[in-house]
Amino acid sequence: MKKKGYFGDFGGRYSPEVLIPALEELEAAYKKLRKSKKFRKELSRLLRNYAGRPSPLTYAPRLTQSWGGAQIYLKREDLNHTGSHKINNALGQALVARAMQKKRLIAETGAGQHGVATATVAARFGFSCTVYMGKEDVRRQALNVFRMRLLGAEVIPVESGTGTLKDATNEAMRDWARTVGDTHYVIGSVIGPHPFPAMVRDFQVIIGHESRKQIKKASGLLPAAVVACVGGGSNAIGIFHGFLKDKKVDLYGVEAGGRGDEPGENAATITFGEIGYFHGARSLFIQKEGGQIRDVHSISAGLDYPGIGPEHAYLASSGRVRYIRARDQEALESFVELARLEGILPALESAHALAAARTLARQYSSARSLIVCLSGRGDKDVAEVERLLGDTV
């Protein structure tokens, strides 16, 4: 029997008692709204006229020639308003929050893209907005911090722990526990307690639905493979859902391989994680002995998270999706490569997917295609890439 809020053995709702009424309120509101034609029509209009959907599926001829093998297509979520896939979910949750008559939005952010998207919809709908961001991410994503403040959001640097996404999420959860009456927590990925993983996925599946139609129109065939980076996993779950039932389409999630395979050197949860309970869900997490969550590392602020969404944990256990790793250096090289060959700056998160796709492309014939989800644009990362590469570019 399928358990509500679970994906196989993963998911559920493991939250402090104070948050249970808010989660039940959210579940009831979303269940009602998703059946509403008015809600679906308004969200569709906003995605089209405000976010700029559909995002293009762009053929990459020079990348294809350089890599050899499959024809390379890029799903251009970087061209959405605010610069990533995060706006899809932020718009959906803003409409839900409005229906629940909330006055304030809060969010966690790593790379800053979800924070920018949440600040954007808060400005659009008239919510007040607070974004929690680790102090290390505030440093390496300074452009997005200023963008959020320009949009009217309060950005609170989190100094606890390693000052990254995990710590920002902790603080956002604490805020919500204190302010559930008038506040909605816009979780940015397919993590957290039920109903967040399913709701965020539902707002991101538009990526996969569009990609499926676009590649069939462009090539006449379904792709041989689809590749996406995975931190918590929202862009990946969104594009994968367009192809999950197509068993001949290979699906690859690319995690942050960081600097190496030793504890604390990466954020590759599927490879090194164990079943545990964190941020309200049962999933895979990188842990110390005794179940304490371990500090992790990635050059990419958006992949620097010690866990993974429960649906990804299920897809890994079922074997439907294969999860592989790309190292920091490989991501940096792919960042520069896409800029030089196609004139596109990818987010460092997306550069992990590109790094893996370079190897995977050679496994397929030139008669087939491979789609890489370009989850965000790399303007936000230019200063950090300059710091790391200096005069070697």
Image: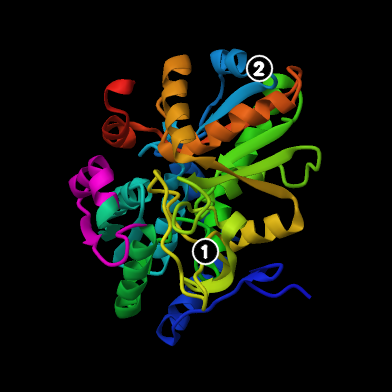
Q: Position of residue 162 (x, y in %)?
A: 32, 61
Q: Secondary structure at mark 1?
A: loop
Helix, strand or loop at disc 2?
Answer: loop
Q: How many marks?
A: 2
Q: In the displayed structure, would residue 289 be above or below residue 88?
A: below
User: Is residue 205 something that shows in the picture?
Assistant: no
Q: Residues within 10 Å of mark 2 (few under 14, many from 20)?
A: some
The magenta segment: 137-164
Image position of 289 with respect to 190: above or below: below
Q: Read off the residue under disc 1.
A: 286
Residue lying at the far bottom in this picture: please name it: 17
Q: Which residue is located at x 73 percent, y 39 percent?
A: 250
Q: Position of residue 215 (x, y in %)?
A: 67, 27
Residue type, numbered disc 1: Ile
Q: Position of residue 168 (x, y in %)?
A: 33, 62
- Examine the image and state in which quarter residue 332 appears: top left
Residue in the foreground of this view, choosing between 168 and 55: 168
Quadrant of the snapshot with the N terminus: bottom right
Q: Which residue is mark 2?
A: 68
Residue type at mark 2: give it.
Gly
Answer with left or right where residue 180 lies relative to residue 263. left
Picture residue at 43% right of the left edge, 77% below the top: 22
